[in-house]
């Protein structure tokens, strides 16, 4: 009786292990199909998720540039209309410095991420 139980247990474990490989490829196909469906519903161009994410990052960086220009223009107007008031000049200078630092940090993070992803992609692709 013990032998039958052990053989049955080994057989069940073997089939559970083998079925995981079959289910993994099926799950990957389902995920790809889901991404393609989402891509179609969002009316984005056909392509892999990396291309879509790259396009979204490009739009995000364009918006970041626009926000930086708006901050610079507002700080410039604040500085020009300060009429010698030291507090307004200090506020405008602070806005310019903080805007430039924010832009630099964001672009540095994007550059570092892009570099790392390119290196990993190159290492994986061979």
Image: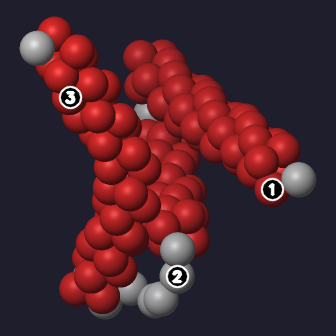
The residue furthest right is 126
Query: What sort of colour scheme is used for the picture?
Result: secondary structure
The quarter holding residue 32 reads bottom left
Residue, x 16% and y 10% (percent of image)? 2
What x and y, as percent, mark residue 17?
Answer: 36, 37
- Please report contact status of discs 2 and 3: CB closer than 8 Å, yes or no: no
Residue, x 38% and y 85% (percent of image)? 44
> First in sequence: mark 2 or mark 3?
3
- Please report contact status of discs 3 and 1: CB closer than 8 Å, yes or no: no
Residue, x 29% and y 34% (percent of image)? 11
Distance between the alpha carbons at the discs numbered 2 and 3: 47 Å
What x and y, as percent, mark residue 62?
Answer: 54, 64
Foreground disc of the pair 2, 3:
3
Residue, x 38% and y 57% (percent of image)? 22
Residue 65 visible somewhere in the drawing: yes
Q: Where is mark 2, residue-wise?
A: 47
Q: Where is mark 1, residue-wise?
A: 125
Distance between the alpha carbons at the discs numbered 3 and 1: 42 Å
Foreground disc of the pair 3, 1:
3
């Amino acid at each position: 009786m013990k032998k039958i139980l052990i053989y049955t247990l080994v057989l069940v474990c073997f089939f559970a292990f083998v079925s995981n490989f079959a289910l993994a490829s099926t799950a990957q196909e389902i995920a790809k199909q889901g991404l393609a469906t989402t891509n179609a519903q969002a009316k984005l161009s056909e392509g892999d998720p990396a291309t879509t994410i790259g396009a979204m990052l490009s739009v995000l960086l364009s918006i970041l540039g626009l926000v930086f220009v708006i901050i610079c223009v507002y700080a410039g107007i604040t500085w020009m209309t300060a009429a010698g008031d030291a507090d307004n000049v200090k506020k405008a200078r602070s806005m310019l410095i903080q805007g430039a630092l924010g832009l630099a940090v964001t672009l540095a993070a994007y550059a570092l991420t892009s570099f790392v992803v390119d290196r990993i992609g190159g290492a994986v692709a061979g």
